[in-house]
Amino acid sequence: MKRIIGLILGLCIALSLTLFAGENPLNVFMILMRSAFGSMYDLGLTLSYTTPLIFCGLSVAVGFHAGLFNIGAEGQLTIAVVTAAAVGILFPNIPFPLAPMVAFAAALLAGGLWGWIAGWLRAYRGSHEVIITIMLNFIAAGLASWFTLQIIPNPNSQSPETAVVSPNYMFKDYDLIARRFPDTPANASLVFAIVFAIVMWIFLWKTPWGFALRAVGSNPEAAHRAGISGKRVQMLAMTIAGAMAGCVALSEVLGSTGQYRIGFSPDYGFIGIAVALLANNNPLGIIAAAFLMGALHKGASDLDLETATITRNFSQIIQALIILGVTAQGYWAWISKNKRRKN
Amino acid sequence: MPKSTQVSLLLGDQMMFKSILTNLLIMLISTFSFANTLKVGLVLDKGGKDDKSFNAAAYLGATKAQKDLKIDLKYVEATDTNAIENLHRSFARKNFDLVIGIGFAQKDAVQKVAAQFPKVKFAIVDGEINAANVRSLLFEEHEGSFLVGALAAMTSKTNSVGFVGGMDIPLIRRFAMGYVAGAKYINPKITTTENYVGVTGEAWNNPAKAKELALAQFAKGADVIYAGAGASNTGVFDAAEDKKKFAIGCDSNQNWIKPGVILTSMLKAVDVAVYDTIKETQEGKFTGGVSRFGLKNKGVDYTLDQYNEKLIPAETRKKLEDIKAKIIAGQIQVPDYYKKK
């Protein structure tokens, strides 16, 4: 409940800022709502942003539960998406039901590997995961660009993108969600995202591995005394985080475009951090938080067209203030606790 | 009922009738004028409207149309690659009359969206699309580049000239090829170097890397560098200023950015093309198909203004005009990268 108040507070503050730009806050709010949910088309776009944000939110949240800050979701998803596209282009003859599974497995492996590198360096070399994952983002971007342009470029376009995977890799024909939202990239991977979020919740709270992971995250010393290997847990957490981010290949390559386009992501990996923070790392909350962020991202895209002074970058201001509003709840609790102690 | 109230009632009715009439009239006028205001959407490429080069030219043309022709103009900048199609579609869905895509990267998006909205008119710069409701605005960059290549060779004292391109794609290779051919036309033994800032969209907006490349070329002996890299061009200009050498601008007339350093600019009249397209659409004369802009119709050219007139001596100018006339007459065949393959 307190989170919702924080959310509304953040949104109100952000909207009232539009007064300074000479706009009517209510009007801006209506534009945001209409643009995010106004029609099946708008809703479809909102959902298509929601899907990768759920994956990235889960990725960041797993890291947080193990006491690790994964800023590398962007790199992990880049590597995974390129891998999925590469499998689709280099092995065009795999038959349908198998093909997307193979590509997806490859993407999970690639993303997982990219996360594991950071986890291993953290566990055995003591390098800080924030630095490592940030640097791995650049390496991933560089590798992906090289692979895209040198090995599997699109021969029919000057744009920096891979060729399109063969059609037996796409699950479009069986996609009930994509059919409901024509002309949008929304697709069945949304269902996968929600299922993964539920599985993640079960994993974290109902399995011994999840317990070990949270134990290391909340008190590594105690976990160590209890016989839990912190190193192994850190590697496991980062691998799962990488694989989760890698799932973006599902919504991007196999679900909609069928290719990797350099610069396709509007920083999903980084918005994923905001999603995880907003949901307090609760996998089920992440579904809602990702939907909110997706709606904001889509909603703001019409600000350019419908207001005179505000551009869509305004969504970042709203995002920031909402996160402040929500996370500030923790400070309120802390302040009131301190007061009680003094009394 | 007393008579006076009846009268006042009658009067009231009349007043109401009048006000309804005026309301109707106002509504009519407003819908009329609304229908008359042309709604134009402009989708800029990643460099953005402040790149002082390619996108800036498009933005200039559109804002000039806004001022002169009283159109309703909205512009957006593409932030991520997947957003381009959505931007075009949202303009079309909001019943814009004309949607203009700037840059080759928008070709696929325009093609797809234009097919779905046959009543909306589209224009695309640097991309060729064959559809009744799409006008493709193509420029003969190699011709203009040949001219500035010739000028570079005539100006160079070290017999070495360079080219710094933005993204390594056929479009920019076309600039380079024309430029090198122009330089060799003046001096067959001249040394030419070519470098590209990058292979992704970031290349258009990375002045630091462009400066490094330009400095390296200057160090190797070049003394004139042609920059064709969008917002990255400023890096080349900085390098030329530091080393007291010359640079050549591109797309917009960039002579004003650093007077005395920028020898000339290869003008690509995107602004004129955009303006004319808007104007013709407003006049109801929009036609689909390909419009080509070359030296012949001043779609590309070299620029001469108060910032660089001292840098180009009269005889050089004469020679340049001579070359220009020869290209237009077909006496000089400028190699075209697109036709090479």
Image: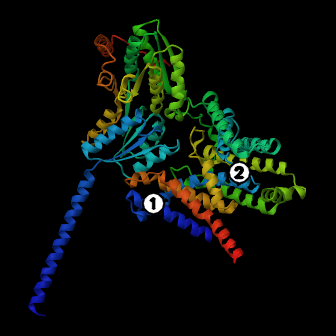
Label for residue A17? 1
The residue positioned 50% from the left and 19% from the top of the image is B341
Mark 2 surroundings within 10 Å by alpha-carbon count, few (fewer than 14), some (14 through 19), many (20 or more): some
Quadrant of the rendered structure where residue B122 is?
Answer: top left
Mark 1 surroundings within 10 Å by alpha-carbon count, few (fewer than 14), some (14 through 19), many (20 or more): some
The residue positioned 27% from the left and 44% from the top of the image is B67
Query: x%, y% of residue A198?
Result: 71, 60
Label for residue B246? none
Query: x%, y% of residue A247?
Result: 68, 48
Amino acid at dot 1? Leu
Q: Residue furthest top?
A: B189
Question: Is A323 located above or below residue B64 in the figure?
Answer: below
Left-right relation of B35 to A236: left
Residue A59 in view: yes
Residue A180 in view: no
Q: Observer-nearest residue: B4 or B180?
A: B180
Question: Is B303 located above or below residue B132 in the figure?
Answer: above
Q: Label 2: which residue?
A: A69
Amino acid at dot 2? Phe
Q: Residue furthest bottom?
A: B1
Q: Residue furthest left?
A: B3
The subunit carrying tag 2 is A
Q: Observer-nearest residue: A325 or A94?
A: A325
